[in-house]
Image (cartoon, rainbow, N blue to C red):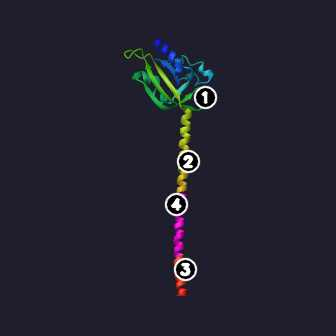
Amino acid sequence: MQDLLSLLERIGPVFVDAFCVVDREGRIIEFNRHFSSLFPRSVARKLRGTECCQFLKLGICETGGCLADQCLESQAAVRFDEILATVEGLEGERCFIVSAVPLAVSDEDEPEGVLILLRDVSDLADVQRKYRASTEVEGRDRDKLEDELHRKVRELLETNTELNRVQTELSAFKKGILG
């Protein structure tokens, strides 16, 4: 496992996303600065050695069991899009794309831990949510305008029909007078 951690220490600084490594017991044994920056400083100082879900509670862990356990049991990579999570020390929920892969020296070896990658898409999810809400409002407004247009067209047709009736009566009246 130490070889894998050494490799992660070398390539970890170029990762754009937050990552952490948990051991078979679910304790955080390694992480990058992006991961620690997800938390307030008071929490970030305590991350190493804590359970992976102690300070970051992923929605998938609450509904389907621990992500690291799922990955270790299946011995396969897993990925979940737009998973809501609560972060210790922060208000509200964050939204993540979460990937996890078991870490083993070779394919024949039992995984010794799990690499968990987290991409915070909270801002993007908020923009999409606001866009959907805006689109729904505009759709309702468009439907109201269409209804108003149909009502006005009906009124116009009724007025035109009434005008034609009055013109016909007027013509008949003129013929009767001038006759």
User: Which disc number belongs to residue 90?
Assistant: 1
Residue 73 sits in quarter: top left
Q: According to the image, label 2 marks what residue?
A: 137
Q: CA distance from mark 4 to mark 2?
A: 20 Å
Residue 122 belongs to the span the image colors magenta: no
Kindly identify the amino acid type of the residue bearing the numbered disc 4: His
Q: According to the image, label 3 marks what residue?
A: 170
Relative to 62, residue 31 above or below: above
Residue 64 point in image, percent of width and height: 45, 29
Residue 82 point in image, percent of width and height: 50, 33
Residue 178 point in image, percent of width and height: 54, 87
Dot 2 falls on a residue whose secondary structure is helix
Q: CA distance from mark 3 to mark 4?
A: 30 Å
What is the magenta range? 147-165
Residue 151 belongs to the span the image colors magenta: yes
Residue toward you, 99 or 73: 99
Q: Nearer the viewer, mark 2 or mark 1?
A: 2
User: Which disc number belongs to residue 150?
Assistant: 4
Q: Nearer the viewer, mark 4 or mark 1?
A: 4
Relative to 124, residue 151 above or below: below
Q: Residue at x 48, y 15 (%)?
A: 7
